[in-house]
Amino acid sequence: MKRSAVLLYGILSYNIGVAGLAWLILAMGGLAPVGISSLQTSSIASALLVNLGLIGLFGVQHSVMARSGFKKWLTSFIPEAAERATYMLMSGIVTMLAIYFWQPLPGTVWSVENPVAQVALWTAYAFGWGYLFIATFVTNHFELMGLRQVYLYFTQRAYTSLPFTRKLMYRYSRHPMMLGFLIGMWALPVMSVSHFMMSSLFTLYIIVGVYLEEKDLVARFGETYRNYKKEIATLIPKLY
């Protein structure tokens, strides 16, 4: 691929990935539509299976494409600089597919009526997603999203891995992005059954995804990360 094509591919992938994440954030708060496909089922059992399959697809894509073995296979077909951009592209597509084809379920798990509690929950919702966003910049937002790699490739500069960091929220939690995700998913004044299922499945994905990512981080940073694990909680300081 030409260097300019790789750069444009990275920018396109970034925008699609961010669009998918933005839709998910808004959908979680009931601020954007969910399940807008005409392919809807009236069967609760079928809806449960479809939703399980959609989040399963999301989990497989995010987990498999993040593994070193898959990256090695993928970069035998595309420039190494485009690998992370491809991950972002597929993440955005799979996220949007999951939201688009989601099968709504009837019922409400909880509905908070107290105005003060509502404000508190909406504040926590905004805090959670904001916390996730800030955490991406504490590491390196552009590296995480694949833009740094394609830019270095375009400018014909050698790629260098970023050093291990434990700044700001990484001093208290090893996975602050996932912590923000969890807060944003669950801190809502109204929790429908449909939303409850989506949040529960995403929570399960996070547990599995963190486990797999930890193994990769140990392999990459060795004793540095092993010591970090001993000192810093996975998600919530002093709890987990």
Image: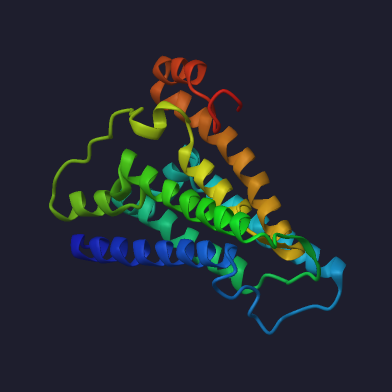
Q: Is residue 7 above or below residue 162?
A: below
Judge left or right: residue 153 versus residue 188: left
Number of marks drawn: 0
- Assign the C terminus to one quadrant of the image: top right
Q: Is residue 1 visible?
A: no
Q: Quarter of the image holding residue 95? A: bottom right
User: Picture quarter containing residue 190?
Assistant: bottom right
* Residue that extends furthest to the bottom in the rendered view of this protein: 38
Residue 178: percent from the left, percent from the top?
A: 52, 43
Q: Nearer the viewer, residue 139 or 131?
A: 131
Q: Nearer the viewer, residue 209 or 135?
A: 135
Q: Is residue 27 at all visible to an observer of this figure?
A: yes
Residue 219 in picture, x, y percent from top left: 46, 25
Viewer-nearest residue: 78 or 135:
135
Percent position of residue 210, x then y? 56, 36
Q: Within the image, what quadrant is residue 33 found in? A: bottom right
Residue at horizontal 42%, vertical 51%?
130
Q: Residue at x 44, y 19 (%)?
A: 228
Looking at the image, residue 202 sits to the left or right of residue 68; the answer is: right
Q: Residue at x 35, y 61 (%)?
A: 14
Residue 186, percent across and down? 63, 52
Is 101 above or below relative to 56? below
